[in-house]
Image: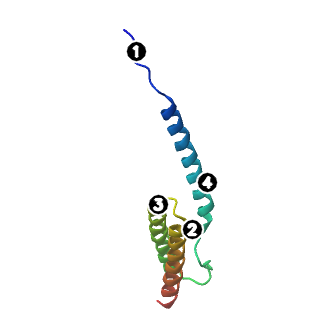
């Protein structure tokens, strides 16, 4: 019984393309990792223990929202920039609100 011949060229090209896209996405994500840092450094002497705990919770929630936003963007750089700006503004606003409580 003769086996049908398979044209492997499209499969190989598809695999190579997938590897290139994956490499580009990982490189881009590594470059954007620094963008997730908070807008404000909170001095330990500025906040009470209760405020420190609340600030940590606020940062964690904002970080999760930021991650979700950037995942939604894919490789769209302007979208990532909007996520970063929104994240920074949210941290600034939450921090200021925490100081006035």
Q: On residue 36, which mark appears?
A: 2
**In this orientation, which residue lies closer to the viewer: 34 or 40?**
34
Residue at which label 4 appears: 27
User: Can residue 49 be seen by looking at this rendering?
Assistant: no
Dot 2 or dot 1, earlier in sequence = 1
Residue at which label 3 appears: 71
Disc 1 element: loop
**In this orientation, which residue lies closer to the viewer: 83 or 17?**
17
Disc 2 element: helix
Horizontal side of residue 41 vs 50, given as left or right: right
**In this orientation, which residue lies closer to the viewer: 10 or 57?**
10
**In this orientation, which residue lies closer to the viewer: 9 or 72?**
9
Quadrant in which the N terminus is drawn: top left
Q: Are marks 3 and 4 in contact (CB under 8 Å)?
A: no
**Residue 49: x %, y % from top left:** 52, 78
Dot 3 or dot 4, earlier in sequence = 4
Horizontal side of residue 53 vs 38, given as left or right: left
- Label 2 crowd bin: few (<14), some (14–19), many (20+), radius 10 Å: some
Q: On residue 3, which mark appears?
A: 1
Question: Of all residues shown, which one is farthest toward the top?
Answer: 1
The image shows residue 55, relative to residue 23, as above or below, that is below
User: Can residue 9 be seen by looking at this rendering?
Assistant: yes
Q: How is the image coloured?
A: rainbow
**Residue 31: x %, y % from top left:** 63, 60
Disc 4 element: helix
Q: CA distance from mark 2 to mark 3?
A: 13 Å
**Residue 92: x %, y % from top left:** 54, 82
Dot 2 or dot 3, earlier in sequence = 2
Dot 1 or dot 4, earlier in sequence = 1
Q: CA distance from mark 2 to mark 1?
A: 54 Å
- Label 1 crowd bin: few (<14), some (14–19), many (20+), radius 10 Å: few
């Amino acid at each position: 019984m003769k086996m049908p011949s398979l044209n492997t060229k499209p499969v190989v090209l598809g695999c190579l393309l997938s590897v290139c896209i994956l490499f580009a996405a990982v490189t881009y994500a590594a470059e954007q990792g620094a963008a997730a840092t908070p807008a404000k450094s909170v001095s330990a002497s500025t906040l009470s223990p209760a405020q420190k705990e609340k600030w940590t919770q606020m940062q964690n929630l904002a970080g999760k929202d930021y991650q979700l936003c950037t995942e939604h963007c894919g490789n769209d750089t302007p979208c990532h920039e909007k996520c970063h700006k929104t994240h920074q503004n949210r941290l600034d606003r939450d921090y200021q609100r925490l100081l006035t409580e």
